[in-house]
Image: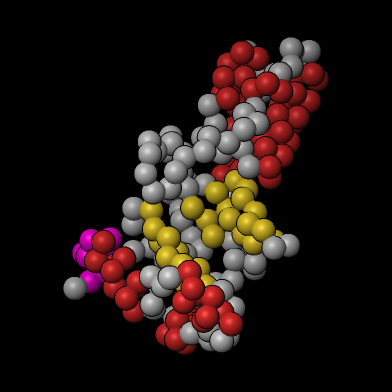
Amino acid sequence: MHPRRQGPELIDAKLIAKYGISLSRWARARRKKAGIANLQYIRYRRFFVLLATHGKHRFFEEEADRIHDARKRPITFWGFSVSYRQGHPHVRIQQTDYSLLKARMLDAAVRQAAEVLWASFRALPYEPYAPVRRQILNILRAVNRRRKLAGLPLVEVTCIRMRRRICRPFGGAPGPSPTPSDGVSGAADA
């Protein structure tokens, strides 16, 4: 059956079984000590990624043409760009989405009232990870520079959310869904 026609649950089972992903914590530790890579499978709807640690594994041979290193090419998903830098995940607004958002907000900077712009910034669908906050603060500074030149009141920094909404990935009430750009790249799409 063509992968597009298979339900995500069938693909889950196939990949988990094929690459031995559902191992105990202790089995993973033994594999790591033996120099064997461990894999993690993460899926949201029809989008999935397989994450692998360093080591030997048949995954690297069988999927060699489709593997990308997140340290060199970020995983993009729903307007976010996730990379791995200096030992930590790094989440930002995807560059194309950031450029479009900045252009839209700068266009509105002198056309809309400060209160309307404040509400627009506050309603942005991006979770405020530190790099995301910096990107949004950069847009706000550019908007306020434009407003200041036009002699208009500035938009207060309180429009930017500083804390993330934490939601459980495997249970509990889901958080609000961001409005993604059309493209998703950097990982396989089931």
Residue 9, position as x, y percentages in the image:
26, 61
- Please determine whether, in this image, residue 24 is positioned above or below residue 124: below
Front one among 2 and 145: 2
What residue do we see at 45% from left, 86% from top? 58
Front one among 70 and 118: 70
Color style of the picture: secondary structure
Residue 36 visible within the image: yes
Residue range in magenta is 2-8
Residue 12, position as x, y percentages in the image:
31, 66
What residue do we see at 73% from left, 62% from top? 86
Q: Residue 154, located in which quarter of the rendered image?
A: top right
Q: Residue 173, located in which quarter of the rendered image?
A: top left
User: 6 left or right of 78?
Assistant: left
Q: Main secondary structure of the magenta part?
A: loop
User: 134 left or right of 67?
Assistant: right
**Quarter of the figure that contains the N terminus:** bottom left
